[in-house]
Amino acid sequence: MCKKPGLVVFDLDYTLWPFWVDTHVDPPFQKNSDGLIRDRNGQTVKLYPEVPAVLEQLHKEGIPIAAASRTGEIRGATQLLDLFGLKHYFSHTEIYPGSKVTHFQRLCQQTRTPLSQMLFFDDESRNIYDVSKLGTWRCVTCVLVPNGMNLALLSHGLEAFARS
Protein backbone atom coordinates (compact mmCIF):
# COMPACT_ATOMS: atom_id res chain seq x y z
CA MET A 1 0.00 0.00 0.00
CA CYS A 2 1.10 3.54 -0.82
CA LYS A 3 2.44 5.72 2.00
CA LYS A 4 -0.10 8.45 2.86
CA PRO A 5 0.43 11.77 4.62
CA GLY A 6 -0.69 12.21 8.21
CA LEU A 7 -1.96 15.71 7.39
CA VAL A 8 -2.59 17.61 4.16
CA VAL A 9 -2.39 21.39 4.54
CA PHE A 10 -3.82 23.93 2.11
CA ASP A 11 -3.24 27.62 1.72
CA LEU A 12 -6.50 29.45 0.91
CA ASP A 13 -5.99 32.51 -1.32
CA TYR A 14 -5.18 31.55 -4.92
CA THR A 15 -4.98 27.91 -3.82
CA LEU A 16 -8.61 27.07 -2.97
CA TRP A 17 -10.19 30.24 -4.35
CA PRO A 18 -9.06 32.69 -7.07
CA PHE A 19 -8.68 35.88 -5.02
CA TRP A 20 -7.11 37.38 -1.91
CA VAL A 21 -9.82 37.53 0.71
CA ASP A 22 -8.26 40.61 2.32
CA THR A 23 -7.96 42.77 -0.84
CA HIS A 24 -9.95 41.48 -3.85
CA VAL A 25 -13.34 40.97 -2.21
CA ASP A 26 -15.26 42.83 0.48
CA PRO A 27 -16.52 40.76 3.44
CA PRO A 28 -18.89 39.91 4.97
CA PHE A 29 -20.19 37.29 2.59
CA GLN A 30 -23.62 35.77 2.20
CA LYS A 31 -25.16 32.89 0.32
CA ASN A 32 -28.17 34.10 -1.62
CA SER A 33 -31.31 32.17 -2.52
CA ASP A 34 -29.70 31.38 -5.89
CA GLY A 35 -26.99 29.44 -4.01
CA LEU A 36 -24.24 31.83 -5.04
CA ILE A 37 -21.94 33.44 -2.50
CA ARG A 38 -21.49 37.17 -2.80
CA ASP A 39 -19.48 39.76 -0.96
CA ARG A 40 -20.84 43.02 0.53
CA ASN A 41 -20.80 44.66 -2.93
CA GLY A 42 -22.67 41.82 -4.64
CA GLN A 43 -19.57 40.40 -6.33
CA THR A 44 -19.88 36.62 -6.77
CA VAL A 45 -17.06 34.60 -5.20
CA LYS A 46 -16.27 31.04 -6.18
CA LEU A 47 -13.84 28.23 -5.46
CA TYR A 48 -11.58 26.74 -8.06
CA PRO A 49 -13.83 24.12 -9.73
CA GLU A 50 -12.14 20.92 -8.48
CA VAL A 51 -11.58 21.99 -4.86
CA PRO A 52 -14.65 20.18 -3.45
CA ALA A 53 -13.61 16.95 -5.22
CA VAL A 54 -10.03 17.30 -3.91
CA LEU A 55 -11.22 17.67 -0.31
CA GLU A 56 -13.78 14.88 -0.67
CA GLN A 57 -11.12 12.48 -2.01
CA LEU A 58 -8.84 13.15 0.96
CA HIS A 59 -11.79 12.82 3.34
CA LYS A 60 -12.78 9.45 1.82
CA GLU A 61 -9.20 8.25 2.21
CA GLY A 62 -9.27 9.24 5.89
CA ILE A 63 -6.48 11.80 5.54
CA PRO A 64 -6.85 14.77 7.91
CA ILE A 65 -6.93 18.24 6.31
CA ALA A 66 -5.83 21.62 7.66
CA ALA A 67 -5.71 25.20 6.39
CA ALA A 68 -2.76 27.56 6.79
CA SER A 69 -3.36 31.11 5.60
CA ARG A 70 -1.44 34.32 6.21
CA THR A 71 -4.45 36.56 5.54
CA GLY A 72 -5.38 39.39 7.85
CA GLU A 73 -9.05 38.82 6.98
CA ILE A 74 -9.52 35.97 9.45
CA ARG A 75 -13.33 36.29 9.77
CA GLY A 76 -13.86 36.51 6.02
CA ALA A 77 -11.70 33.46 5.26
CA THR A 78 -13.40 31.44 8.00
CA GLN A 79 -16.83 32.57 6.80
CA LEU A 80 -16.03 31.46 3.24
CA LEU A 81 -14.96 27.99 4.38
CA ASP A 82 -18.35 27.72 6.08
CA LEU A 83 -20.44 29.16 3.22
CA PHE A 84 -18.68 27.01 0.62
CA GLY A 85 -19.56 23.97 2.75
CA LEU A 86 -15.90 23.09 3.34
CA LYS A 87 -15.52 23.74 7.07
CA HIS A 88 -16.27 20.13 8.02
CA TYR A 89 -13.29 18.89 5.99
CA PHE A 90 -10.77 20.85 8.05
CA SER A 91 -9.67 19.37 11.36
CA HIS A 92 -7.50 22.44 12.06
CA THR A 93 -7.21 25.97 10.73
CA GLU A 94 -4.32 28.36 11.23
CA ILE A 95 -5.60 31.61 9.70
CA TYR A 96 -3.76 34.79 10.73
CA PRO A 97 -0.96 37.07 9.44
CA GLY A 98 2.65 36.01 9.85
CA SER A 99 5.01 33.32 8.69
CA LYS A 100 3.80 29.93 7.52
CA VAL A 101 6.55 28.55 9.73
CA THR A 102 4.45 29.53 12.76
CA HIS A 103 1.36 27.97 11.21
CA PHE A 104 3.18 24.67 10.74
CA GLN A 105 4.77 24.68 14.18
CA ARG A 106 1.30 25.07 15.69
CA LEU A 107 -0.20 22.39 13.42
CA CYS A 108 2.59 20.04 14.45
CA GLN A 109 1.87 20.68 18.15
CA GLN A 110 -1.92 20.53 17.86
CA THR A 111 -2.16 17.46 15.64
CA ARG A 112 0.94 15.67 16.96
CA THR A 113 1.77 15.00 13.31
CA PRO A 114 5.49 15.16 12.53
CA LEU A 115 6.44 17.71 9.87
CA SER A 116 7.79 14.86 7.76
CA GLN A 117 4.26 13.42 7.59
CA MET A 118 2.72 16.61 6.18
CA LEU A 119 1.88 17.49 2.58
CA PHE A 120 1.45 21.20 1.79
CA PHE A 121 -0.15 22.97 -1.19
CA ASP A 122 0.41 26.72 -1.71
CA ASP A 123 0.47 29.17 -4.62
CA GLU A 124 3.39 31.25 -3.30
CA SER A 125 6.99 30.14 -3.81
CA ARG A 126 8.15 32.01 -0.69
CA ASN A 127 5.80 29.95 1.49
CA ILE A 128 6.92 26.73 -0.20
CA TYR A 129 10.55 27.72 0.41
CA ASP A 130 10.01 28.59 4.10
CA VAL A 131 7.97 25.47 4.90
CA SER A 132 10.22 23.10 2.92
CA LYS A 133 13.09 24.00 5.27
CA LEU A 134 11.18 22.90 8.39
CA GLY A 135 12.19 19.67 10.07
CA THR A 136 15.47 18.16 11.12
CA TRP A 137 16.15 15.44 8.58
CA ARG A 138 12.90 14.99 6.64
CA CYS A 139 10.88 18.04 5.76
CA VAL A 140 7.32 18.87 4.79
CA THR A 141 6.52 17.74 1.24
CA CYS A 142 5.50 20.92 -0.60
CA VAL A 143 3.69 21.40 -3.91
CA LEU A 144 3.44 24.71 -5.73
CA VAL A 145 -0.09 25.47 -6.97
CA PRO A 146 0.29 27.68 -10.06
CA ASN A 147 -3.35 27.92 -11.20
CA GLY A 148 -5.60 26.75 -8.38
CA MET A 149 -5.96 23.40 -6.65
CA ASN A 150 -7.16 20.47 -8.77
CA LEU A 151 -7.23 16.68 -8.77
CA ALA A 152 -4.10 16.36 -10.94
CA LEU A 153 -2.10 18.42 -8.44
CA LEU A 154 -3.47 16.35 -5.59
CA SER A 155 -2.31 13.16 -7.33
CA HIS A 156 1.09 14.72 -8.00
CA GLY A 157 1.42 15.73 -4.34
CA LEU A 158 0.36 12.33 -3.00
CA GLU A 159 2.86 10.62 -5.34
CA ALA A 160 5.65 13.01 -4.27
CA PHE A 161 4.83 12.32 -0.63
CA ALA A 162 4.86 8.55 -1.19
CA ARG A 163 8.35 8.83 -2.73
CA SER A 164 9.71 10.98 0.10
Image (spheres, grey):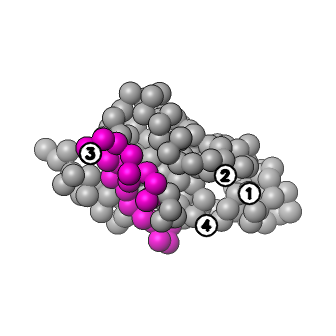
Residue 141 on the magenta span: yes
**Which stretch is magenta?**
128-148
Question: Do the numbered discs 4 and 2 sit on residues whose CB atoms are within 8 Å?
Answer: no
Name the residue carrying label 2: 71
Name the residue carrying label 4: 18
* Vertical arrangement, residue 159 with respect to residue 8, above or below: below
Name the residue carrying label 3: 138
- Of residues 23 and 134, the one nearer the viewer is 134
Question: Do the numbered discs 2 and 1 sit on residues whose CB atoms are within 8 Å?
Answer: yes
Residue 74 visible in the displayed image:
yes
What's the residue type where badge 4 is placed?
Pro
Left or right, residue 49 beside residue 36: left
User: Which one is earlier in the sequence, the residue at label 1 or at label 3?
Assistant: 1
Q: Residue at x 32, y 58 (%)?
A: 157
As drawn, which residue projects farthest toward the right?
A: 41
Residue 85 visible in the displayed image:
no
Mark 4: give few (<14), some (14-19) or many (20+) Cα within 10 Å. Answer: some
Left or right, residue 10 beside residue 21: left
In which quadrant of the rendered view does residue 60 lie? Answer: top left
* Vertical arrangement, residue 61 with respect to residue 153, above or below: above
Q: Residue at x 85, y 57 (%)?
A: 40
